[in-house]
Each structure stands twice: as structure tokens, then as C-alpha cells.
Image (spheres, helix red, strand yellow):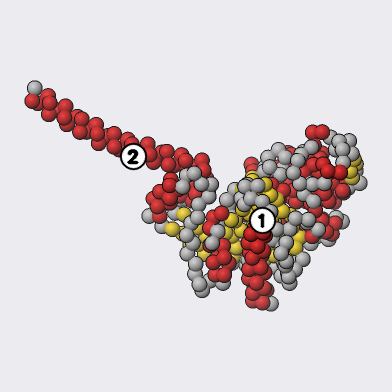
Amino acid sequence: MSLYIKSLRMARLMWKKVKRYLCLIISVIIVLGATALYFPDEMDAIATAGVIDVEAVEVVATEGTTQATTTTAATTEATTTAITTIATTAAQTTTTQAITIDDNSPTAEIDRLLAQWGNTISVYYENLSTGFIYRHNANREYFGASLTKALLALMIYQMAEQGEASLDSVHSFTQADYRGGSGVIRHRYSVGATFTLRRLLELNLSYSDNISTMILVRTFGIDSYRRFVASVGGNPALVRERVMNSQLTANEAGIFARAIYAYLESEGRYSEEFRRHLLNNQFHFLARNGSDYPVASKTGWTDGRAWHDMAIVYAESPFILVVMSARTGFTEQNFRDFNEILRAFERFNGNIYEIYN
């Protein structure tokens, strides 16, 4: 009996240890599951060789022969800390990561500026003369909102260049095209109204008219747009059925802006018309409080999901600047923050221009 009791006690002790380990394993699984659901970007970072890439700056020389990448990354030891931090803030939709700033770096001013917002904001900058690229949190996916309308317009203008579409063709507004939100059609026109393709493109770009976008998508098809996204180097898997409800990263928006700039500079038949509509954007975010240069841009917003601007800034050395966030509403603070970012990159871009000239 004594041996039986000892065996029983030992079995119970071992079971307690097993239960402890099982609880630990289950806790880790729950944390990782919550992280994957609420923080897909952070999970990608943790999964990449056990490090978290918190900042990267890529420099690409004009000839494409020299590439240098400066990366500040936490070591594998930081993985455990990151998981713990995410677990304790699972109710939040974003986290803020510490960014190490090199005061001797030519991007130090920008690094310091963006550090205050951490990964709650995403930036893509490219100098179009030198090929210098700066990225901050540029692979985070956002609700794309109306930013994608600019690439849809590029597709249609290029089709018109090739004789596959006529800007004088007439298109009707149907009940299926109706959408609330931004635009003028829903306020001024009734179902059955007709518009030329040229007018729809203007409304789509300068006034971010959702109904005009729906007419364009219905006319040209979402599959055509997906193929076009792939052709310029984008990810068609992020495209959704209404175009403006697609997912988007700052990095991909930068690719779109580069393709748009190439067409604007191509002296195509409709290049200047396209540029004029972008310059006439009625909803500037970056440049709403001023810029030293003309800014051709497309903005997009959805409260709490998207507050974005994709701009081509016509400085002495033109540059692309994409800023994306999940901010809410047309607030003065949002306009001030975005303009502060624009001004910082204008100064930085001026330094690059002086170096290369």
C-alpha cells in the first residue's frame, strides 16, 4: 500500500508539472493567435529570422549599379519582448516600437520626426532624379480608400492612348453605381444621367467621386484592373471588387505613383490632362497647409481606417511622397502632421538635389 501511495503521489506531481507546461503552451498559442489576428505586420516581423525590422532606408543609385540598405533591427532576444508587449495591448489596433536614430545619418531629421508616430504611420519617398528611396513602415497594409482611383485612371488613359477606349464615349449612371461618400454626382445628378469618359475621369481624380469610380469599374471590369496592377509591379491579390476598397501599402502606392509619373512625363496625348486633374485635387492633405512646389496628388480617407496622400511633388528635383495612416477625420492636427512631414521631405529633397548637382 505504501508503494502504491508513493506511486500515486509521484504521478500527481508529474501531472501538475505536465499541466503547467500545457498551460504555458496554450497561453503561447493564444498570444500568437491574437497577434496574427490583430497585428499581422508584427507577426511578419517576428517570423522573419527572429528579428523585428523597425526601420529601413534603401538607397538606389541612378544607374542601378549601387544599392545600399541601412537597417536598424532588434536582435532575436527582442522577439520575446515583442510578443509580451503585443499580448498586453491586444485590445489596441496599433503598437509603437522604439526606433534607434543615428544622428550622423542624412535622414536623422526625418527619422526623429517619424519616430514620434512609430508604426501608426507609413511613408514612402523616392527622388525621381536620383532613385533615392526612403521607407518607414512601408509594408503595413491599410484600407486603400480612394488612393487606388489614380491607378485606375492611369489604366484608362493608357487604353485611350492605344485606341482601346475613347474619352468622348458616353456612359450612364445606373442605380447599381450609387455610392455614398465623396463626390458630386450623388448631390447634383439623378440615376440615368450621362457623362463622357473624360468627365468621369476628372470627377474620379479631382473630386474623388465614388459614383464615377463605380461607373468606370463597371465599364472596364475589375479583372482588367487586376491585370494592370500586376503589370506595373503591384500585388493583384490586394485588389477588391470596387477598386477603392482594396488593401494597399505605402510601398505599393509608391510603385503606383512611379508608374503615373512615367506616363505624365511621356508626352502622351492625355498626359497633361491627367496631370491637371491631379494638380486640381480638391482634398489635399500633405499640401493643404502649403508647399513650396506644385503638388499633383490623390488622397483617400475612411474614418478610422484610412487617411492617405499619394503625391508627386514638382520640386527642382521631383519626388514621390506617400503618407498613409488609419487616422480619423478632417482634423487640423492631421493636416498639421502631414504638412510637417511634407516640409521635412522638401528640405531633405533639397539637400539631395544640391549633392547631385
**Front: mark 1 or 2:** 1
Q: Is residue 98 left or right of residue 268?
A: left
Q: Is residue 3 left or right of residue 14?
A: left
Q: Is residue 155 above or below residue 350?
A: above
* Nearest the eye: 223 or 300: 300
Regarding residue 158, the answer to whether it shows in the image is no
Say whether disc 1 or disc 2 marks the residue closer to the N-terminus: 2
The three-letter code of the residue at mark 1 reads: Thr
Q: Residue furthest left?
A: 2
Give me the residue at 71% from left, 64% from top: 289
Give me the residue at 24% from left, 34% from top: 16
Residue underneath mark 2: 24
The three-letter code of the residue at mark 2 reads: Leu
In terms of image quadrants, where is residue 246? top right
Regarding residue 52, the answer to whether it shows in the image is yes
CB atoms of marks 1 and 2 within 8 Å = no
Regarding mark 2 in the picture, which secondary structure is present there? Answer: helix
Give me the residue at 63% from left, 68% from top: 344
In terms of image quadrants, where is residue 285? bottom right
Residue underneath mark 1: 331
Task: Provide residue 316's location: percent of width, then percent of height.
Answer: 73, 72
Task: Provide residue 21's location: percent of width, then percent of height.
Answer: 30, 38
Q: Give the quadrant of the C terminus.
A: bottom right
Regarding mark 1 in the picture, which secondary structure is present there? Answer: loop
- How many residues crowd around disc 1 within 10 Å: few (fewer than 14), some, or many (20 or more)? few
Q: Is residue 103 above or below residue 249?
A: below
Task: Provide residue 305's location: percent of width, then percent of height.
Answer: 63, 47
Task: Provide residue 259's location: percent of width, then percent of height.
Answer: 72, 55
Give me the residue at 72% from left, 43% from top: 243
Q: Give the quadrant of the N terminus.
A: top left
